[in-house]
Image: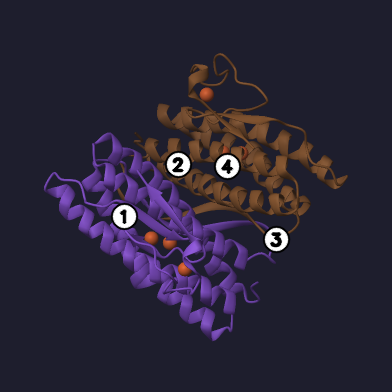
Chain colours: A brown, B purple
Amino acid sequence: MVKNDQTAQNLRSAYAGESMAYQRYIAWGEKAKEEGFENVALLFKAIANAEQVHAGNHFRAHENKDGGFLVAGGGEFGYGSTSENLVGAIAGEEGEIEQMYPAYSLVAKEQGESDAVRSFHYSLEAEQIHAKLYREAKEHVDKGEDIELEYVSICQVCGHTVVDGVPEKCPVCGEPSSKFRKFTK
Amino acid sequence: MVKNDQTAQNLRSAYAGESMAYQRYIAWGEKAKEEGFENVALLFKAIANAEQVHAGNHFRAHENKDGGFLVAGGGEFGYGSTSENLVGAIAGEEGEIEQMYPAYSLVAKEQGESDAVRSFHYSLEAEQIHAKLYREAKEHVDKGEDIELEYVSICQVCGHTVVDGVPEKCPVCGEPSSKFRKFTK
Ligand SMILES: [Fe+2]
Ligand SMILES: [Fe+2]
Ligand SMILES: [Fe+2]
Ligand SMILES: [Fe+2]
Ligand SMILES: [Fe+2]
Ligand SMILES: [Fe+2]
């Protein structure tokens, strides 16, 4: 639940951003598949699920404020080659890491908004992994090769993202391995 | 593809709206399941997929305009009982039917934006069915009973939504029945 209007607004903006991120990663994943980058496609699909976890967390943190709102949120656009789409993916993640989540977290802490603090923290942790994975993917794609991976695990509580492994305990939220969802080809 | 800034902005707003609708229907579907309304849960999940089709259409119509944008889009918030969530679902659909899509369609036609005209038309057609289905669901839920349905079919080209049937040819976009995805329990 949320008490302060500023944190409520930030939750809505972050929710809009995560909701749009989910949809563009689904679309860009389909594009990667078309281009023969099967593992990049899998990475997009799994990370989309992490953004869905984030969107759900922000939405439920806002559960006590009903109604329709006009929401401003950041989104990356364009549907080109996978190399171009990865530029957009990296830019979106970096914007969240460097600007959005640090600012929203600062305000939520100051306002004593514990649900929002947790929800923003979970997202910020995952976005750093996403940015790194997308940067690595772009290096491979720019050489005309796919990335190497077998599966991707996503924590359904916080969106923590692991390539080719499932931690016994989520290092971000502390939940057990049973909370991870595995994405395979 | 899109040429005019105003239609491009409308595509982004509609994309934000559809992206948020997808996520709230997923969340509200989980809530309906928790409350024992299994068929309402299935309806939310299937309609979420229709909104995903709409989001993808708007996103691809905007394919030639790359970059990061701050996007304003309408969203419904609150995570309460299924009856309360259906109030939000109906309000969201009605806002799209009565205000957003008619306005965006008018501008897109005037600007000769054929991809946007098609994308807005597909959405408007589906939202009318969604509003009707959610109103019927609310009537049942308010009597404490689930709705009756076996499966829901969603056209993966336009989002057309059919309960307990698959048309031979989609009445909205003209694609064959093979383009429908079936959502079952
Ligand atoms: Fe995220
Ligand atoms: Fe991310
Ligand atoms: Fe976690
Ligand atoms: Fe829609
Ligand atoms: Fe709808
Ligand atoms: Fe259709």
Say whether residue A133 is left or right of residue B170: right
What separation in Å lies between label 2 and label 1 (alpha carbons)?
19 Å
Q: Nearer the viewer, mark 1 or mark 3?
A: 1
Tag 2 residue: A11
Q: Residues within 10 Å of mark 1 (few under 14, many from 20)?
A: many
Label 3 CB sits under 8 Å from any ligand 2 atom: no
Chain of the residue under label 2: A
Q: Dot 1 lies on which element?
A: helix
Residue furthest to the top: A168
Q: Dot 4 lies on which element?
A: helix
Q: Looking at the picture, which amino acid does disc 2 mark?
A: Leu
**Dividing the picture into quarters, in which one does residue A123 lie?**
top right
Report the residue at 49% width, 36% height from top: A53
* Residue B179 image offset from top left, x and y in percent: 51, 62
Tag 1 residue: B89
Say whether residue B85 is left or right of residue A169: left
Q: Residues within 10 Å of mark 2 (few under 14, many from 20)?
A: many
Tag 4 residue: A48
Q: Are marks 4 and 2 on the same chain?
A: yes
Q: Nearer the viewer, mark 2 or mark 3?
A: 3
Tag 3 residue: B66
Q: Are marks 2 and 1 on the same chain?
A: no
